[in-house]
Amino acid sequence: MKEHTIALLTECEAGLKMATGSMEQTLPKLSDPGFKTMFQDYYTKHAKLQEECKRQLKEQQKEEDQYEKNPPLIAKLMSDLKIAKCEDMGDVADFYTDGCNMGMKTIAKCLNKYMQASEESISLARKVIKMEQHFMEDLRAYL
């Protein structure tokens, strides 16, 4: 059970880290007040879930254990490149819609793979999926 919990939380944390990092790069580029407010709200939600993920991981760890997982470097570079190419709200909405979809798929796969994870970690993973669904729905207005 502990291994499944750690694996699920580690994947969630890596995805949330990728999302918040990308969002930090994008926020200064946003000029539309409504879009920026919505985007900032989701950045805050992502950051809170990332902190919750870290807290749960810390509870699972022994001092000598290190479970932090960073997003693959190639994914980070590709993300940075795509963000740099975003010229308007439509481009940003398109990029983050794809990111939400990827995040939901990845976490859903992990939920299926790590079925013996703790209820608390499963609940957190489901919150991430639900948040990504709502973010995607809100982004549709800007596509």
Image (tube, helix red, strand yellow):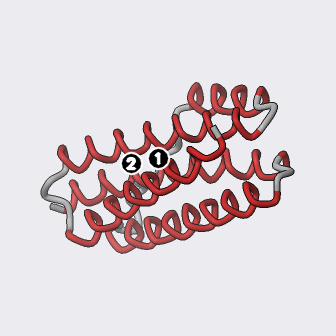
Task: Kindly identify the residue that appears in the image at 68 percent across and 50 percent down.
Answer: 23
| Rendered position, 131 above or below 109 | below
At label 2, the amino acid type is Glu
At label 1, the amino acid type is Lys
Binning the other alpha carbons within 10 Å of mark 2 as few (below 14), some (14 to 19) or many (20 upward) gives: many
Q: Tell me residue 32's x, y (percent).
A: 82, 53
Number of numbered markers? 2
The reply to whether callout 2 and callout 1 are in contact (CB within 8 Å) is yes
Q: Tell me residue 27's x, y (percent).
A: 77, 52
Label 1: state its secondary structure: loop
Question: Is residue 77 rendered to the left or right of residue 46?
Answer: right
Task: Kindly identify the residue that appears in the image at 18 percent across and 44 percent down.
Answer: 113
Task: Kindly identify the residue that appears in the image at 36 percent across and 74 percent down.
Answer: 59
| Rendered position, 101 above or below 77 | below
Quadrant where the N terminus sits is bottom left
Given residues 11 and 69, the one toward you in this image is: 11
Name the residue carrying label 1: 69
Given residues 74 and 105, the one toward you in this image is: 105
Given residues 14 and 3, the one toward you in this image is: 14
How far apart marks 2 and 1 lie (CA) works out to: 7 Å
Question: Is residue 142 rendered to the left or right of residue 97?
Answer: right
Task: Kindly identify the residue that appears in the image at 33 percent across and 47 percent down.
Answer: 107
Name the residue carrying label 2: 11
Residue 95: quarter of image? top right
Question: Is residue 122 rendered to the left or right of residue 106?
Answer: left
Q: Tell me residue 112's x, y (percent).
A: 18, 46
- Tag in front: 2 or 1: 2
Binning the other alpha carbons within 10 Å of mark 1 as few (below 14), some (14 to 19) or many (20 upward) gives: some
